[in-house]
Amino acid sequence: MKNFIATCLLILSFHPLFTSEPIKDSIVWGQNGHRIVAQICYNNLDQNVQKEIDKILGTDYLAQVATWPDFIRSEKNWDFSKPWHFITVNSNTTVEQVIDKAAKDPKINNVYEAIELMASILKGNRVATELLQDLVDSNKAKLLNNSIEATALAFLVHFIGDVHQPMHVGKNNDFGGNKINVLFFSEKTNLHSVWDSGMIEKEGLSFTDFSGFIEMHTAPNKHTWQKANMIDWVQESVAIREKIYNTIYDNTDRSTGLPSMSYQYQHDFIGTVEARLGAAGYRAAKILNMIY
C-alpha cells in the first residue's frame, strides 16, 4: 500500500522519509499556529482552487478546520491517528536507516506517510481513500462533516504544519521537548509548549493579523521554499531542532536551575517561528494548487 501511494505522488516530489517513535500527546503549533498556516495556504491558492476548497468544506473555513486534527486526539476512536502528527529522527541514526525501518512497517505511522496518504486521497486515489475509510470504520471514528475529502483536506494542511514545527521532529525519547522543563517569561512550562504556542501567543496578534504579517515579510522566499521537497522540509526542522537544543541553557534561572527564556529568546527565535509557519503555508498551497 505504501509503495502504491508513493508511486501515485511522484508528481509532488515526495520521497520516503522517517519512521517515528511515540511522542507525548501535545498540540503542535497550538490553535493559532495551525490557523496561520491554513490562512497563508488559502491566501496563496489559485482562485479556482479556493472555490473547490470552499465547496468541499461547505460552511467551514480552511483556517477553522485546520485545528480539528488536534481536537480529535482526545477521542479514543481516533487514537490510531496520533502517530501521524510527528516523526522521530534520533541523532545516532541516518536518514537511510530510518527509511529502511519505515519501509518494513505496513502501517501509516508517521507524519510523512500521513501527508502522503491525505494528498493521494485528495487526488482521488481509490486505494488510499479505502484505506482511510477502513480505519475510520473499524475504529468507529467520525469523519469531519461526514466527508472523507474534507477530512483528508483538514489532515493534510494540519500535518504540513506539524512537520514544520521543529520540536515535532523528535529525538532521544524526550517526547519532542515535553520532558524538558523551562521557564518562559518566569512561568514554568516545557520546551515543546514554548514552540507550540508560547512564542506565537506572546506576540499578541490574531491569527489573521499574524498571517498577514508573515506574508508581508516572507513573500520573497515563497518560490524558493516551494521548490523544496518533503525531505528538505524535515531536514530544515532537524537543523532548527539542533539549534534549539544547543542553545537551551544559554540562560538559566539561578533559583531553579531551569533554562530561562524571555525577551532575548523571543527576539532570537520568533523570526524562525514566522519562517516555519510561512513555509508551511506556502508549501501547502502549492500542493493543493497541483491537486486541483
Image: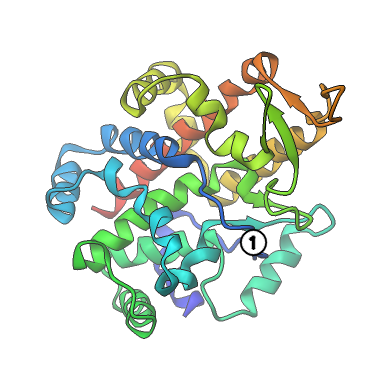
Name the residue rendered at 69%, 54% in the picture. Answer: 175
- On the image, which quarter does residue 7 sit in? bottom left
User: Against 96, is 275 above or below?
Assistant: above
Q: How is the image coloured?
A: rainbow
Element under label 1? loop
Q: How many marks?
A: 1
Name the residue rendered at 76%, 39% in the picture. Answer: 242
Q: Is residue 43 left or right of residue 8?
A: left
Residue sitting farthest toward the front: 255
State the residue in front, 206 or 125. Answer: 206
User: Against 249, is 18 above or below?
Assistant: below
Q: Is residue 12 left or right of residue 102?
A: left
State the residue in front, 2 or 81. Answer: 81
Q: Is residue 2 left or right of residue 135?
A: right
Relative image position of residue 33 (x, y in whole percent): 44, 36
**Callout 1: 10 Å neighbours few (<14), some, many (20+)?**
many
Tell me the amino acid under the disc marked 1. Answer: Phe
Relative image position of residue 204 (x, y in whole percent): 44, 19
Relative image position of residue 219 (x, y in whole percent): 40, 22
State the residue in front, 119 or 273. Answer: 273
Relative image position of residue 58 (x, y in whole percent): 12, 52
Name the residue rendered at 80%, 59% in the picture. Answer: 93
User: Against 85, is 288 above or below?
Assistant: above
**Which residue was labeled with disc 1?**
18
Evaluate whether residue 89 shows in this view: yes
User: Against 185, is 112 above or below?
Assistant: below
Residue sitting farthest toward the bottom: 138
Evaluate whether residue 113 shows in this view: no
